[in-house]
Image (cartoon, grey):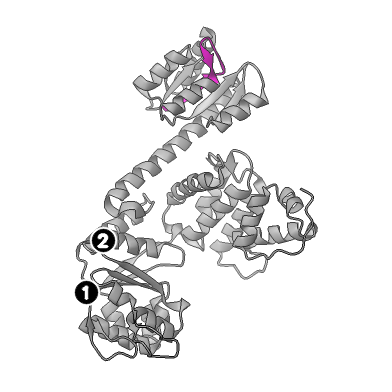
Amino acid sequence: MRSDTILVVDDEKLIRWSLRQHLQNESFSVLEAETVKMGLDRVSEFEPDLIILDQGLPDGTGIEFIQKLKEMSYEIPIIMLSAVDSSNIAVQAMKLGALDYITKPINFEELKIIVEKALESIRLKRQISHLREEQKKQFGNLAIIGDSPVMKKLFTMMTKIAASDSSTVLVTGESGVGKELVVRSIHMLSQRKDKCFMAVTCASLSESLIESELFGHQKGAFTDAKNLKKGMFEIADGGTIFLDEIGDISPNLQVKLLRVLDQKSFKRVGGTSEISVDVRIITATNQPLEQKVAEGKFRADLFYRLNVVHLHVPPLRERGKDVLILAQFFIQEFNKAFRKNFKGLTEETKEAFLSYRWQGNVRELKNVIERAVLLEEGDYIFSRPIEVGHLNTLSNKASTGSYTSGKDLTFGEMEKNAVLEALSKTSFNQSRAARLLQISRDQLRYKMKKYGIHNRIETDDS
C-alpha cells in the first residue's frame, strides 16, 4: 500500500464505491465521506494527501467545503466533481485553489492522470518546504534550495567554513550560480552574523571610486571630497566584506588589498592615520584566477592570501533534479507576485529542463520561470509545444557548444523582442499590444520598464 491517502467526498454511495475500487487498484489508501461536515472531520483526523470533492452535497456545496478548508488553514489539493458542466463553478473552484474540475460520468483514465499530477505537485512542494526548513536552521532566511549530492557537499563545506570565521574565502563558480547567496549564508552562519555585511562588485566601479568605497576618504582628498567618509572596511569592523568579481581589480588596488590582509589596517584616501579593523574578507569570481596569475594580470601573493579556503559553487547542469525543485520554488514565488495559480511544469517541460544545459544557471532559470508565469496561460508552465521545442533546440545547441548564431537568443532577449514586435505592430498602443501578447496592460508596462523600452506618443483605445 502506497503512502498517499485520498479522501472521496460524495453523497452517492455508488460513486464512492467506484472511486474506491479504482483508486485502491492503483495502491492508494482511500477514505470516504458523504457530507461537508463528515469530510471536514475526516480532514481533521487524517489530513489526506488529496481530496476528490463533489459539488453537490446534502449539507452544502463543494465550494463551501473548500472555503471552510481554507479557514482551517489546510492546503490540500482538491479535484472537483460535478454532475453539471458549469464554467462558473469551475472558475470559482479554481480561484479558491482547486487543482482541477471534471464532470460526471467520470473518465477514470483521465482521473488517474490528474491524480498523479496533483500528488506529484504536492510532493514537490513538500520537498521544497522540508528543504527550506532544514536549511533555514543552518543558514537563516537566506536558505539555498538544493537536494543533490553536490549541493549537500556544498552545505557541509559552508558550515565548516563559517565555524572558522577568521580565514579568507575564495568562492568560485559560473555567472548566475548564486555565489553572493552562498557568501551571505556563510556570514549569517558565522559568529559575525550580528555585525555588518558589506558587498561591492569590483567590476562596476572605477579604480578611484572603489578605493574610496572600500577605504573611505578624508575631507579635501579630491575635488568632490567635501566631507570625511568612512569606507566599507571601517563600517564593517567585526563583520564581513564581500568583494565580488575580484579578478577585475587594478594592480594598484591589489597592492592595497594585500596590505589590509597582511596588517589588518589601512589608510583612508588622503589620510595619514592607520585604521585597524577586524574584518573577514570573502571574495568571488567566475574567472580562472590561476590563469590570470600565470599571465601576470593578478598578483600571486594576493591570490594565495585570498585562496586560504576555496569554495566552488556547482553549475545548475551538475545538480540533477535540483532544477525541478528550483523551478517549482520560483513558480510559487512568482504565482504570489503576479497573482497567478500555475500548478507546475508539464512532463515535456520537465524533460526539456533536465536536458537543457542552463548556461546562465539559476539566474537564467529564474528569468525563464518569471517570464512564463507572467505571459503563459493555463494550469502548467509551457503548455504550448513551441516553447518546449525552442528550449530543446537551445539544449541541443548547448550540448555541442554552438551559441554563435544570432538566432540563438536567450529567453530575456526573446521576450524583449516579442514586446517590441507587439508594440511596433500596434504603433505603440499599449492596450492593443497587451491584448496581442495576451497579457494585462500592467504586465506589459512591467516588461517595458524591465527591458528599458521607452514610451512613445501613443493612442489608447481602452
Question: Which element carries disc 1, helix, strand or loop?
Answer: loop
Total residue callouts:
2
The amino acid sitting under disc 2 is Lys
Quarter that holds the N terminus: top left
Q: Is residue 165 above or below residue 105?
A: below
Against 113, residue 85 (above or below) is: above
What predominant SS class does the magenta segment belong to?
Answer: strand
- Determine if residue 143 is in view: no
Amino acid residing under circle 1: Asp
Where are the magenta residues, as a range?
A: 49-62
Left or right of 217? Residue 156 is left
Q: Position of residue 122 (x, y in %)?
A: 45, 35
| Residue 332 visible in rendering | yes
Q: Which residue is mark 2?
A: 193
Q: Position of residue 360 (x, y in %)?
A: 51, 63
Residue shown at 58% from the left, 41% from the top: 380
Q: Residue at x 49, y 60 (%)?
A: 363
Crowd class of label 1 (few under 14; some 14 to 19; many from 20; radius 10 Å)? some
Residue 207 is situated, as x and y percent measured from the top left of the image, at 43, 85
Query: Label 2 to label 1, Cα distance in Å?
Result: 14 Å
- Residue 193 sits in quarter: bottom left
User: As drawn, which residue projects farthest toward the front?
Assistant: 226
Tag 1 residue:
278
Earlier in the chain: of badge 2 and badge 1, it is 2
Q: Which mark is residue 36?
A: none
* Residue appearing at x 28%, y 59% in the figure: 188
Front residue (pair 133, 396): 133
| Residue drawn at 55 percent across, 50 percent down | 352
The answer to which quarter of the image holds residue 101 is: top right
The image shows residue 264, relative to residue 345, as above or below, that is below
